[in-house]
Image (tube, grey):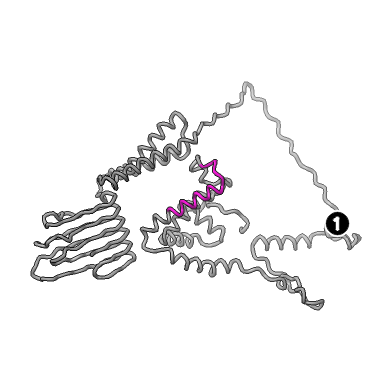
């Protein structure tokens, strides 16, 4: 088992067979590895980067020794193995940097888990090699009276099976007593002569008017189409980002999957004449399903991008809850005068949400953070499912402004 190459398992796989393949290689319960993979995904996104890298570099059972990266992205087939591994490692670093900034845990716990795995699991399964005395070879200064120790026990299943097979061969092999004893063991036994066996094939019955089938022509799969599609997708998403960040145009969340679907549709149109590469049609179907799902009339999370709002009068405060999808949001209430009892609600899905309270007046802040950090006048907290409230009541008889804030993944700052 230790000598077999790593493969993703085909049977017992839940997602891609990575944990099942590692469990088969290490002879452990795959549930333990799946739990560890989820924990690593929460610790800086390392589990996600490792799983994606394994899907791109480790082949499945019965798929040969080529990287799955060559099959998923045909334009990488001309890359060397070193270049493919380097690209996957770079993708893993990008995933870790991107996803890790949204998670509440850093990379510090990973070091502790690494030490726990090495000293608690790896060292027990792979003990240090015995020295010369333990292996049966006498030490240089042991002298003629030194008695060699018995040989060390085999460590792996392969070594134990090989030792048992050698012992059985030694018991079953006949010993020639007339053979000279000074010859090596292989020269005491005559070499066996083997004859190659070739069975006679059965006669082929004659079939009248039979013509062999014409082999199916192999379809042309252009290597330049995938780079073209990726350029179209990247150009479309970059255009939407420039419109949202630079020009401040409110870009709806539906525009992003629709742009990807449009680029893939152009790629399929070109593929109808030039030949369709592998993976283009399934990816187009996934993009179409995501776009149709966002067209269903469910409550929208809001737009994506940075936003800054300011309210100076109570009439400007929205009466309904304001939702923002992802990005940095700055809410300035510093110039607001609290003249009536009102409630203001704001929710941000992912990113940083900053609130500046009015300079005077009664204010109550009810806040919650799903995963991230909170910093406010009542202290600093970080973790998962955080909730709290801050009250600043200077005049009990005066109106009170209640601000309800919710941050999904990211930071919440109240000043």
Q: Which residues are magenta?
A: 76-94
Give x and y (percent) for residue 371.
Answer: 33, 62
Where's residue 276, x and y in %? 46, 34
Instruction: Give the answer, above or below, for where 270 lies relative to 242.
Output: above
Seen at 48% across and 38% down, the residue is: 278
Q: Secondary structure at mark 1?
A: helix
Q: Label the magenta part by its dominant secondary structure.
A: helix
The answer to whether residue 226 is above or below residue 145 is above
Looking at the rendering, in which quadrant would you find the N terminus?
Answer: bottom right
Residue at the far bottom: name it. 145
Q: Residue at x 44, y 38 (%)?
A: 280
Query: Would you say 222 lies left or right of 198 here?
Result: left
The residue at which mark 1 appears reads as 187
The image shows residue 81 at horizontal and vertical percentages of 56, 47
Which quadrant would residue 344 be assigned to in this image? Answer: bottom left
Which quadrant holds residue 162? bottom right
Does residue 57 show up magenta in the picture? no
Determine whether 113 is above or below 277 in the image: below
Is residue 77 on the magenta stretch?
yes
Mark 1: give few (<14), some (14-19) or many (20+) Cα within 10 Å.
Answer: few
Image quarter (top left, top right, bottom left or bottom right) of the C terminus: bottom left
The structure residue drawn at horizontal position 44% and vertical position 66%, both measured from the top left corner, is: 109
Q: How many labels, in total?
A: 1
Query: Quadrant of the rendered structure where residue 286 is?
Result: top left
């Amino acid at each position: 088992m230790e000598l077999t190459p790593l493969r993703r398992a085909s049977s017992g796989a839940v997602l891609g067979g990575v944990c099942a393949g590692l469990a088969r290689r290490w002879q452990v319960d795959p549930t333990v590895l799946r739990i560890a993979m989820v924990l690593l995904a929460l610790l800086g996104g390392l589990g996600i980067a490792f799983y994606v890298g394994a899907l791109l570099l480790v082949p499945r059972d019965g798929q040969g020794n080529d990287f799955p990266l060559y099959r998923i992205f045909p334009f990488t087939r001309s890359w060397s193995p070193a270049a493919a591994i380097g690209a996957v490692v770079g993708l893993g670093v990008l995933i870790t940097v991107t996803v890790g900034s949204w998670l509440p845990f850093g990379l510090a716990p990973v070091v502790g888990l690494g030490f726990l795995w090495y000293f608690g699991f790896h060292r027990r399964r792979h003990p240090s090699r015995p020295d010369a005395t333990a292996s049966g070879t006498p030490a240089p200064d042991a002298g003629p009276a030194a008695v060699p120790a018995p040989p060390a026990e085999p460590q792996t299943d392969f070594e134990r099976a090989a030792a048992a097979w050698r012992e059985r061969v030694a018991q079953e092999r006949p010993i020639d007593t007339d053979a000279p004893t000074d010859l090596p063991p292989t020269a005491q036994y005559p070499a066996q002569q083997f004859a190659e066996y070739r069975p006679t094939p059965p006669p082929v019955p004659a079939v009248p008017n039979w013509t062999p089938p014409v082999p199916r022509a192999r379809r042309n799969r252009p290597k330049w189409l995938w780079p073209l599609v990726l350029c179209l997708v990247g150009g479309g998403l970059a255009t939407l980002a420039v419109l949202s960040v630079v020009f401040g145009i409110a870009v709806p969340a539906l525009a992003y999957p629709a742009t990807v679907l449009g680029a893939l549709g152009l790629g399929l149109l070109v593929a109808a004449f030039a030949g369709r590469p592998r993976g283009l049609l399934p990816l187009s179907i996934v993009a179409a399903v995501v776009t149709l799902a966002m067209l269903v009339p469910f409550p929208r999370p809001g737009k994506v991008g940075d936003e800054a709002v300011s309210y100076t009068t109570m009439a400007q405060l929205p009466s309904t809850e304001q939702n923002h999808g992802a990005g940095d949001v700055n809410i300035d209430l510093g110039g607001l005068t609290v003249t009536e009892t009102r409630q203001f609600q704001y929710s941000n899905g992912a990113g940083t949400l900053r609130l500046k309270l009015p300079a005077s007046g009664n204010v109550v802040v009810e806040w919650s953070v799903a995963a991230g950090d909170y910093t406010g006048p009542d202290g600093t907290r970080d973790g998962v499912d955080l909730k709290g409230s801050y009250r600043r009541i200077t005049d009990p008889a005066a109106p009170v402004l209640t601000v309800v804030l919710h941050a999904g993944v990211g930071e919440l700052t109240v000043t």
